């Protein structure tokens, strides 16, 4: 579909070209009309075939699932409306914890990740300790399995019985998430910063900008744009991992589902929680697409300078 | 463009063929063997039992297996209450010790739909009508009470009644009746903490992240005696609705073995074997103040 659209778009451009070139009213030649008709029939045929094969695939999938010998059992275990209704309010309540964690940890991760990335890309021998420290941080926390990090922070830190340090599993879990994810995000930022061609920095420096100004006004704006898709990946991943704070006993969406599943041995609450997470991710993706598109438009305008 | 389209079409038809192949491959799955054989108590002779491996009895439990239900995380030792019960049931069904095979199955997986890999699961699972919709239970082999434990130094240790627990931060393992007791009986003002494992609940108790945790009474005795020695049993709950909470053996829904396993458990209760095993392994877990 999109292919044919593009083609017709190209032809529109051609038409305009003909008009501006000839000056007279444009009359397509019989050969051209024939060619367009042929293209239309091909496009219709392609659409019909796509529709038919989609339909067949759908029907086959339907019968594979519904015709499976275990389907009635699976249906009542995973898709029971009564349990879905029972689970929804509790799972939503749990999901609110996931959302709050996502917002707070997401912001902290972006700030910390950016700082670490900048520390790693600093030049000059003076900054060697900072670079080494930042590198050690990313190496360690990217390598450490998140679940172990969480166990250590959520279960280990309170065991120290430090005065004034919280024992709240949500705060501790959020800290652990931030530690791990800022290491990932720092690497995304660093890759973005290093992907900006050195000539950009050189040009900025030759214009009289200091190293810091070059980073702030020339390198980072270009880097950030390239980082949006991988950053979104990490954010979605973080969103799902916020549930791991349940190690400390906090009740998030998945644990809320767990509680009902444990009592009823019916798995429908998991489906409810899963769909809610998916529903949360889709608007996030669309929002990022919109932001990226807007940035691209702005860049295009800036290009005419 | 045409090339691309042709390639696309070729991929699509290949995918359709693959799907059909999958459909054909999946379809002829054997139907449930939940036939009428072995449903009457008379036909429970060993030779007629349709176990997973013929001539063997496969029994499942979670790993690690906790005391006092199993000793030293070794279900096959015959030591510990549930291990002893499992072997007594096996013997009743006609299986010698050597013909019992143990299998490690996580708590949650034991209830998942689909064909089970074990004949029955023994894992401190409380019988409830709601759960009976998903699996079969044997008759109960143990009447269990839920108990509250707290650090001796904490305010929770002084609780005398259920009402005294209301304002506390309580915790329990998820998927247990212990958590249901907190939610349905205590109805605390703070949301209870739900842990994936009792181990995490114990460490939260030690670290002061919760004021008290709820576990079943024998486990409570074991924890306070051996694991968290600066904790004590605050008390036990009364039975809800007059019927005692019971642990049952878990079987596949519609299993041909259910009635035979049930009659085996009933026979063991009748001849006093269960009481003897209980006395041997859970004798200390009889007395704790009742929280009214």
Image (spheres, helix red, strand yellow):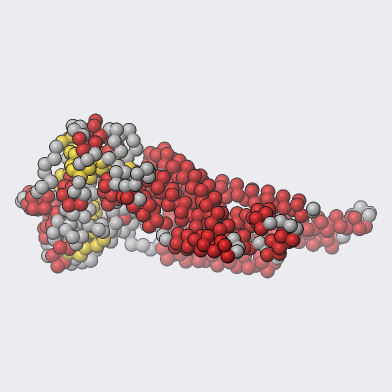
Residue displayed at 81% across by 56% down:
A13
Quadrant position of residue B289: top left
Residue A264 image point, x, y percent: 31, 44
Q: Relative to A15, is A164 on the left or the right?
A: left
Question: In which quadrant will I find the N terminus of chain A?
Answer: bottom right
| Residue A44 image offset from top left, x and y in percent | 69, 57
Judged from this view, the residue extending furthest toward the left is: B271
Q: Is residue B211 visible?
A: yes
Examine the rendered structure and indicate whether residue B147 appears above or below residue B32: above
Residue at image coords 46%, 56%: A180
Residue A34 lies, in percent from the top left, at 81, 61
Write the residue at 41% across / 49% down: A173
Relative depth, front residue between B2 and A229:
A229
Find residue A4 and report its image quarter. bottom right
Taking depth in this image into account, of A14 and B9 the one nearest to the observer is: A14
Residue A42 in sight here: no
- Residue placed furthest toward the front: A126
């Amino acid at each position: 579909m999109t292919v044919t659209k593009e083609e017709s778009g190209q032809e529109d451009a051609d038409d305009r070209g003909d008009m501006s070139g000839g000056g007279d009213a444009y009359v397509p030649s019989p050969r051209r009309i024939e060619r367009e008709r042929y293209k239309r029939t091909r496009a219709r045929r392609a659409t019909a075939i796509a529709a038919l094969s989609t339909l067949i695939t759908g029907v086959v999938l339907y019968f594979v699932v519904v015709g499976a010998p275990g389907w009635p059992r699976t249906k009542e275990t995973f898709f029971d409306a009564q349990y879905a209704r029972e689970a929804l309010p509790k799972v939503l309540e749990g999901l609110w914890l996931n959302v709050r964690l996502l917002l707070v940890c997401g912001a902290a991760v972006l700030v910390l990740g950016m700082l670490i990335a900048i520390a790693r890309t600093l030049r000059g021998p003076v900054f060697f300790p900072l670079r080494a420290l930042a590198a050690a941080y990313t190496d360690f926390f990217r390598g450490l399995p998140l679940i172990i990090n969480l166990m250590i922070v959520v279960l280990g830190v309170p065991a120290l019985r430090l005065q004034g340090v919280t024992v709240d599993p949500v705060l501790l879990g959020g800290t652990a998430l931030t530690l791990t994810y800022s290491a990932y995000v720092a690497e995304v930022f660093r890759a973005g910063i290093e992907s900006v061609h050195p000539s950009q920095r050189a040009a900025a420096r030759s214009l009289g900008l200091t190293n810091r100004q070059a980073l702030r006004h020339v390198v980072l704006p270009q880097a950030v744009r390239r980082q949006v898709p991988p950053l979104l990946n990490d954010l979605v991943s973080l969103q799902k991992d916020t549930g791991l704070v349940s190690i400390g006993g906090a009740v998030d969406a998945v644990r809320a589902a767990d509680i009902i599943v444990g009592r009823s041995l019916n798995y429908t609450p998991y489906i409810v929680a899963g769909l809610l997470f998916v529903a949360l991710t889709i608007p996030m993706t669309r929002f990022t697409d919109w932001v990226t598109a807007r940035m691209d438009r702005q860049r295009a305008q800036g290009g005419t300078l | 463009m045409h090339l691309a389209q042709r390639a696309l079409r070729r991929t699509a038809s290949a995918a359709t063929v693959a799907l059909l192949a999958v459909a054909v491959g999946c379809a002829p799955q054997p139907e449930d063997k939940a036939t009428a054989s072995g449903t009457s108590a008379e036909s429970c002779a060993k030779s007629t039992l349709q176990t997973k491996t013929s001539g063997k009895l496969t029994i499942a439990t979670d790993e690690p297996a906790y005391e006092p239900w199993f000793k030293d995380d070794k279900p096959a030792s015959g030591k510990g209450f549930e291990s002893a019960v499992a072997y007594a049931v096996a013997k009743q069904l006609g299986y010698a010790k050597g013909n019992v095979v143990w299998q490690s199955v996580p708590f949650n997986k034991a209830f998942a739909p689909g064909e089970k890999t074990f004949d029955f699961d023994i894992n401190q699972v409380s019988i409830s009508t709601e759960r009976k919709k998903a699996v079969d239970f044997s008759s109960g082999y143990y009447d269990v009470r839920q108990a509250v434990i707290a650090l001796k130094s904490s305010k929770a240790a002084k609780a005398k009644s259920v009402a005294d627990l209301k304002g506390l931060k309580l915790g329990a393992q998820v998927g247990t009746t212990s958590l249901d007791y907190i939610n349905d009986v205590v109805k605390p003002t703070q949301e209870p903490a739900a842990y994936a494992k009792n181990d995490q609940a114990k460490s939260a108790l030690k670290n002061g992240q919760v004021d008290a945790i709820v576990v079943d009474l024998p486990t409570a005795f074991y924890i306070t005696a051996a694991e968290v020695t600066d904790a004590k049993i605050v008390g036990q709950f009364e039975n809800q609705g007059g019927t005692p909470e019971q642990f049952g053996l878990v079987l596949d829904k519609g299993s041909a073995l259910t009635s035979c396993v049930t009659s085996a458990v009933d026979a063991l209760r009748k001849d006093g074997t269960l009481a003897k095993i209980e006395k041997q392994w859970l004798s200390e877990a009889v007395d704790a103040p009742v929280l009214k």
